[in-house]
Structures are given as structure tokens and as C-alpha cells.
């Protein structure tokens, strides 16, 4: 299964009791549809994601980054503070494709663009030939 969405928080690496590292992050996907009355409705679905293959990509998986994930979905039941039973969607990720948009990506682009627009040591004197 494939999903495309944005990270809702920065990815984190945790170590299990068996000394294996897992990267955890959360992704929100958006869908829109028209109801019977013809009104457009937006629906957001949140996935708790895990990635066991390599924790090294944690640096680039930042809040807001657009990603395309391949993997499988499972559900996890849990009990809310008020005692109500709930369930969450877990996405066991096998492949991650980055489509950009995270904080670190934007910061790197801003720095690069600033460097392109600056010209070193421009003289502002009046002795210009034109």
C-alpha cells in the first residue's frame, strides 16, 4: 500500500529492549469528496509510522516534509483517559520517498537563495562610469 502525506512532527529514533533501532513518525493524509448535498468535504487521516531499516534518515524527516510511503497498515486498539475504546492506524514503512517541504529543507533552500542574491564587496561609491 502507498500513502502520500506530510509529517506532523519530527521523526524520532528509539531503541527497543532487544537493542534494535526503530524510527517513529506521524503522517497526515488529506482526502476530499462531495457529500449527497454536493458540498465538498475534507477528511484528514493520521498514521503512526515505524521504519526499521535505517534510522539515519531521521535527520531529514522533519515536520511538514511531504513523503510517499510504501508498506502495510495495521490497527492498534487503546483505551482513552475517559475509558472509551479507540483505535489508531499504524503504517509499517518499507520504503520512503521524499518530496520536500520540511523545516531543514526550507532552511537549506533559503540559505542557498540568500547566497545567490548577494554579491561580495559591492562598492556603493559615486564614481561609476554610467
Image: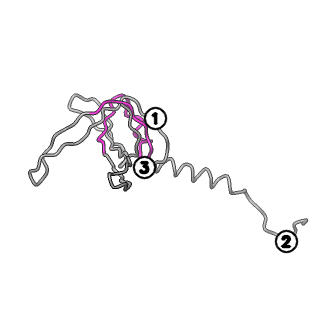
Name of the residue lying farthest toward the front: 37
Q: SS at mark 1?
A: strand
Quadrant position of the C terminus in the picture: bottom right
* CA distance separating discs 3 and 2: 47 Å
Residue 14, compared with residue 122, is above or below; it is above
The residue labelled by disc 3 is: 64
Label placed on residue 97: 1
Residue density around tag 2, few if under 14, some if 14–19, many if 20 or more, within 10 Å: few
Q: Is residue 24 magenta?
A: no
Q: Is residue 98 left or right of residue 39?
A: right
| Residue ID for mark 2 | 126
Q: Earlier in the sequence, mark 3 or mark 1?
A: 3
* Percent coordinates x, y for residue 67 in the rendering: 43, 40
Gap between marks 3 and 1 measured at Cα? 14 Å
Which disc, if any, is residue 3?
none
Q: Residue at x 54, y 49 (%)?
A: 108
Could you tell me which secondary element the residue under label 3 belongs to? Answer: loop
Instruction: Tell me which numbered mark, 3 or 2, is placed earlier along the sequence.
Output: 3
Mark in front: 2 vs 1: 1
Residues marked 2 and 1 touching at CB (< 8 Å): no
Q: Which of the two residues, 119 or 60, is positioned nearer the viewer here?
A: 60
The front one of 87 and 9 is 87
Disc 2 versus disc 1: distance between alpha carbons?
53 Å
Q: Nearer the viewer, residue 85 or 35?
A: 35
Q: Which residues are magenta?
A: 46-73
Rendering coords of residue 99 (x, y %): 49, 41
First reached walking from the N terminus: tag 2 or tag 1: 1
Q: Quadrant of the N terminus?
A: top left
Dot 1: few (<14), some (14–19), or many (≥20) neighbours within 10 Å? few
| SS state under label 2 | loop
Q: Residue at x 42, y 49 (%)?
A: 64
Amino acid at each position: 500500500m502507498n500513502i502520500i502525506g506530510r509529517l506532523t512532527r519530527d521523526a524520532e529514533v528509539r531503541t527497543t529492549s532487544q537493542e534494535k533501532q526503530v524510527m517513529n513518525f506521524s503522517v497526515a493524509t488529506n482526502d476530499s469528496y462531495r457529500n449527497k448535498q454536493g458540498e465538498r468535504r475534507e477528511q484528514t487521516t493520521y498514521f503512526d509510522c515505524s521504519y526499521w531499516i535505517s534510522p539515519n534518515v531521521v535527520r531529514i524527516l522533519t515536520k511538514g516534509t511531504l513523503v510517499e510511503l510504501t508498506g502495510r497498515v495495521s490497527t492498534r486498539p487503546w483505551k482513552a483517559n475517559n475509558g472509551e475504546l479507540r483505535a489508531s492506524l499504524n503504517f509499517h514503512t518499507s520504503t520512503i520517498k521524499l518530496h520536500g517541504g520540511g523545516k531543514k529543507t526550507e532552511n537549506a533552500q533559503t540559505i542557498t537563495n540568500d547566497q545567490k542574491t548577494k554579491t561580495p564587496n559591492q562598492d556603493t561609491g559615486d564614481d561609476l562610469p554610467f
